Amino acid sequence: MARKKKYPKRLKRSESFVGIHFDLHVSDDCTEIGKNVTRRMVQDIIDQVRPDYIQCDCKGHRGLSSYPTKVGSPAPGFVRDQLKIWRDVTAENGVALFMHYSGVYDAEALRRHPSWARVDAQGKRDKKITSVFGPYVDKLLIPQFKELSDEYGIDGVWCDGECWATEPDWSEKVIKAFQNQTGIRSVPRKPEDPYYFEFMEFCREGFRRYLDHYVTEMHKHNPDFQIASNWAYTSFMPEPATINVDYISGDYSPQDSINTARLEARCLPRQGKPWDLMAWSFAGLALSTKSAVQLQQEAAVTLSAGGGFQAYFRQKNDCSIYDGQMNVMAEVAKFCRARQKVCHHAQAVPQVGLIMSGKAFYRKIPKLFSFWEDQLTEMHGILEGLLESQHSVEVLMEHHLAGRMDEYPLLVVPEWEYLGPEFKRDLREYVRSGGNLLLIGPKAAAMFKKELRVRFIGKAEDNTRYLEYDGCMACVKTLSQRVRIKSGAKPFGGLYPRSEPRGNTQAAASIARCGKGRIAATYFNFGEPYVVGATVTARRFLDALVRELFPSPMVEVTGSKYVDVAVNRIDGKLAINLVNTAGPHHDRTISVFDEIPPIGPLGVTIRTENRPKKITLEPAGTEMPFIFSNGAAKLEVPRLEIHDIIVVE
């Protein structure tokens, strides 16, 4: 009897830090799968990059499998079983192997089984999106996962095309179940119809049950099989991670990746699951490969929040790779590894909390879940304004604050039109007990008029106003609200009808005492105007308003607006991440760049009760001279290339 091979131990996803993702989305012209996939190819990837895991293709949105599946729909032609090669070589090297697998989004399954499709509002069967209420999960997805686990020894799946692709289902079965559960007889089909939100919530719950079902079944079948549903429990699906997925992951936008990563990296650390984010290694219509420097900057945003990092590279039609791209990933991996000890699994120190309300989000979006933050322009603008004033910010869902709201010196509500009654009550108590609350925009302010001590005059209107702050003016074309400020509150900044501080002014914001704390609001929307046309005046206005409420943060950094600050703790030490966000990443006319202007010198003030024993700058390990007086250590970072970490012992 042949002896079973003994392989090196592979890291669990919870222990993993750097990975590579390959996918193909096999199509009808893939007739020579495996032709150029060799052991040497896979070994070269591992030798160059030294990843903790590799993800490669097994089924994309087209629904064809790139391995000779017996339970699914195989690609048109195979030269060899390429998946067996990936598994053998990764196992021999102690590298975990995960599959890119498209779940809900499966065109081939619906071509063969039209009855598995979701039904749209007009009664037509979808040709791409399956029904999460139907048999697809039991007839195809779970059997194929079991095949991957049992026949190939795969470590797990990164399940794509899931929450972001799921659509409402108006099939007869779903309508009947909705009516029986809710008692609602009329079936809403448009957002303006009565009970449309209730129907969307019913369909969201359908996705949750679908996800829970296959995760539970696979964990029963193989407890070591690790599963992520792409973008579940991120800003796309902002809610507690109640289903036992093994890790959280998502692939952020290939263009302006820094700003999409800024938001997602701050959403995930408090979700209670291992997490990583995936960069696209290419951008633009021509799918040009990004430079190592560009990907290092994207990685730095994720590492600074404590997460793992992976990058997505394309596979050829036979599932081989573009060999020349691995030298780029090798440089990126080396950059990440140098920072692993002071970044991975670090936890943010509570400073500024930007509230990502799932309850408000689901009432706002037209889809079940989001797709690449297409409904979060306001969140992006406010977050960018805060980060570009060097505030250390976490993006917090309601459940992240349960029982610990008072840990945050400042909470910011970003233009939500709805907050749950209990959460509003908790925010009021937070302020009365000494907290500081900033409400952005007329709709958010309207929920706290009493505490703000203002009276709204007329209705909020979309118009062009000019924000005045500190003698400078900036145009803000957005929703604004006239208010009358009562006794006990004070105005802050002004909005004018023309680009001069004359005429019929209105308060841009106000601040009031509320119990032991303070509450402030802006009476114009800040987020979208800042995304589409950021101005120095708007940024300085927001910064000054924040500093009125929170004048003494733990860390202050001066010298450049292009440095993001993330204050963390790791192994009992303070780790202050400085990320250089300069460069043309936000310019949609530029897909690839290879130079990030260094910034500095940067002045750094760290407030701490006791004089630090030592301060070092990592990953170089340079001991930094500092002056300590009046409870603050002051030092200078001469130059910041991309990402350094100040470690305080």
Image (cartoon, rainbow, N blue to C red):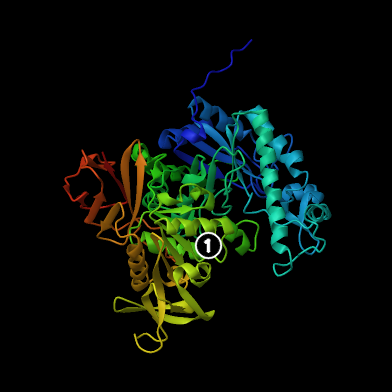
Q: Nearer the viewer, residue 423 or 181?
A: 423
The extreme top residue here reads: 1
Q: Nearer the viewer, residue 402 or 397?
A: 402
Crowd tier of the residue under label 1, counting other residues whose Cα lies within 10 Å: few below 14, some 14–19, many 20 or above:
some
Residue 352 image position (x, y, % from top left): 39, 55
* Residue 480 horizontal side relative to residue 418, left or right: left
Residue 221, given in percent of the width and then of the height, sits at 68, 29
> Viewed as shown, does residue 616 lie left or right of 588?
left
Q: Is residue 281 visible?
A: no
Quarter of the image that includes the N terminus? top right
The residue positioned 20% from the left and 51% from the top of the image is 634
Q: Residue at x 33, y 62 (%)?
A: 389
Seen from the viewer's position, the closer of residues 603 and 525 is 525
- The answer to which quarter of the image holds residue 156 is top right
Q: Secondary structure at mark 1?
A: loop
Q: Position of residue 276 (x, y in %)?
A: 48, 44
Quarter-of-image position of residue 486 = bottom left
User: Residue at 69% across / 42% down in the picture?
Assistant: 75
**Residue 294 seen in the current view:** yes
Kind of residue at badge 1 = Leu
Q: Nearer the viewer, residue 320 or 585?
A: 585
Q: Position of residue 388 (x, y in %)?
A: 35, 61
The residue labelled by disc 1 is 376
Whether residue 442 sits left or right of residue 421 in the image: it is left
Image quarter in which the C terminus is found = top left
